[in-house]
Amino acid sequence: MLNRIPKDVDYYRFTDARKSIQGEILLKHCHRLMDSIILDENAKTLSIKVDLDFGIDDFGHRFMSGKISTNVDLECQRCMQPMALPIDLDIAIAVIRDGDDEAEDAINGIYEPYFIADKTEPFPLFEYIEDELLLALPLIAKHEKDCVKLSDYNDNIEEEFEQQLEQKVNPFEVLKHLKN
Ligand SMILES: [Zn+2]
């Protein structure tokens, strides 16, 4: 079992040896993901939990399966407040060679295909994990419930502000003052 998450793995060697990887990646190593989330104090210590098994199944498919999970804060696009988003991904992929249609058909419905150019090419585990997490982020982050109240509150403040503005520039009020 590996506790350190390798950046790249030799996929064929890992599946042959039926290796397991269990450990954590600190979020600060995932620059693309960091660009998409709120970087508060909390984010500095955030990590991604990785629990993956490599192997060859009864049909000879070389798979990588398991879980990737983390918890990030996104900015809600309605109230601009932080929104916690737990991410739990079930992973089941099979690495196959580009253009190997037969292999792609064979794993259809069982594993997601991950294409590499040839057998000797290392599988970019780190990059794969970050890609999967980025794909799991919503296009537009919005609180499901909590922020409705907050946005009502904001609307009220805006209304009050507008009323105050109207009062200030009411021309009849100005005329009254002039007459006096
Ligand atoms: Zn919100």
Image (cartoon, helix red, strand yellow):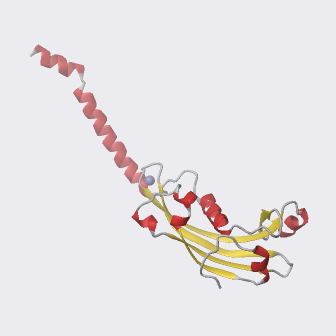
What is the x, y in percent for residue 115? 79, 63
Answer with left or right where residue 56 lies relative to residue 136. Answer: right
Residue 174 visible in rendering: yes
Whole-percent x, y for residue 52 in the image: 67, 77
Q: Locate the C terminus by quadrant.
A: top left
Give the total of numbered labels. 0
Q: Position of residue 118 (x, y in %)?
A: 83, 66
Residue for point 67% across, 65% down: 128
Q: Horizontal placement of 8 versus 141: left or right?
A: right
- Residue drawn at 57 percent across, 55 percent down: 138
x%, y% of residue 56?
A: 80, 80
Q: Residue 171, located in which quarter of the rendered image?
A: top left
Direction right: furthest residue: 102
Q: In the displayed structure, would residue 139 be above or below residue 66? A: above
Instruction: Determine which quarter of the picture holds residue 159.
Output: top left
Q: Residue at x 38, y 52 (%)?
A: 150
Residue 52's place in the image compared with 172, above or below, is: below
Q: Nearer the viewer, residue 58 or 155?
A: 58
In the rendered image, the quadrant that contains the N terminus is bottom right
Looking at this rendering, what residue extends furthest in the left direction? 180
* Residue farthest to the top, as pictured: 179
In the image: residue 16, left or right of residue 152:
right
Q: Residue furthest front?
A: 120
Identified at 13% across, 15% down, the residue is 178
* Residue 109 visible in the picture: no
Q: Nearer the viewer, residue 45 or 133?
A: 45
Classify 8 as above or below 155.
below
